[in-house]
Amino acid sequence: MTKDISLKVVRYENRYKNDWDKFVNEAKNSTFLFRRDFMEYHKDRFEDFSLLLFKNDKLIAVFPANIRNNEVFSHEGLSYGGFIIKSKLSLIDFFNVVKHSLYFYHQSKIKYVHLKLLPDFYNLDRSHEMQYALFLLKAELVRKDAYYMLPSDEFSLNRNRKRALKKAHQYNFDITTEGSLEVFWDTLLIPNLQKRFEAMPVHTKEEIEKLKQLFPDNIKFYSVYENDKIKAGVVMFISKRVAHFQYSSGDEHRDSGALDLLFTHIMKKYQTKPFISLGSSSEKNGLVINKGLMYWKESFGARMVSQDFYRVQTGNYSYLENIFR
């Protein structure tokens, strides 16, 4: 490989934590999920194999990743991954970052790198460098998820949501940020996920409580109460451009409109953010779309964008050579 002697690839160690976090805070395509405190809350479950890339001793990119079965993933413990960069990084430097990273992994006897791309609307600036690099690398598109979002100024309720909201106003509901996350988790979220999807939350309630303490400006819990009894709850992940509904659930024993009321309240509250994210409605690695989830999200004005998942052979690093003339 033709090496850029000014470029250095370093595997992440704890001594780089401050440098990593500072870079992530200033990058054009990152969120607080890439902060080390977030990445490492479940470090017992994932073996870290993140990279830092320096040019002339200046940090120009980071790559959040874990390793499993001798394959690298960016990132199995996060909603998305990829190379994190700043707006001023040139295309030549970006391709060198990707090429040298793949070469580093290839020299470490790793055959594949898997990437779960950050949806475009999270980016602070234009950021399609990775998609072009994946094309050049002959990467394999292995999965697409149906990801629902809406520009916050396009929030609108369909007829059924308006009807439910009107019904909710008949009750003595109180919306609060001081509700019990533990009660929500145990009495609403877990039972409803198990009943409807035979699934469990990605996080435990203890993990979310810990993350809320670490990121109080980014993780919020909202709930609806009636006479001291919880009726609905939502956990929000708030980044620079996006208000994301991470978890939501309501009392399904009575069609009171409590969850409709809470969603409407939150969407109005975060209209200062450019986008609202309602997450994926896909199942079975994107091959099935859940109609109930799809309808619920579309009823608030959300529409689908795709989140793409790729697999790259590390030995294909050479495809990024000699592409400029």
Image (cartoon, rainbow, N blue to C red):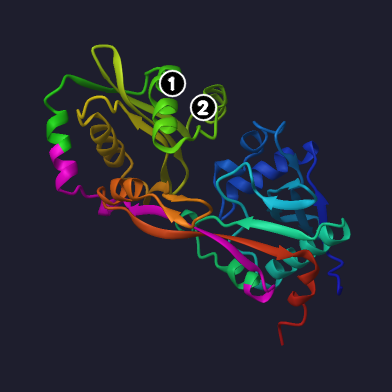
Residue farthest to the bottom, as pictured: 325
Residue 4 in the image: state x and y as whole percent. 83, 69
- Residue 242 vs 257, above or below: the answer is below
Q: Quadrant of residue 77?
A: top right
Is 7 colored magenta in this rendering?
A: no
Is 151 colored magenta in this rendering?
A: yes
Residue 67 in the image: state x and y as whole percent. 75, 47
Q: Which mark is residue 181?
A: 1
Q: Is residue 244 left or right of residue 143?
A: left
Inspect this view and state whether residue 189 appears: yes
Q: Which residues are magenta?
A: 135-163
| Location of the C terminus (image quadrant) | bottom right
- Residue 59 vs 255, above or below: the answer is below
**Residue in the image at 87% along x and 67% along y:** 5
Residue farthest to the top, as pictured: 228
> Label 1: how many residues lie within 10 Å, few (<14), some (14-19) or many (20+)?
many
Q: Give the structural element (helix, strand or loop) at label 2.
A: helix
Front residue of 305/120: it is 305
Q: Which mark is residue 61?
A: none
Residue 317 in the image: state x and y as whole percent. 78, 70
Give the residue type at disc 1. Answer: Leu
Q: Is residue 70 left or right of residue 213?
A: right
Give the residue type at disc 2. Answer: Lys
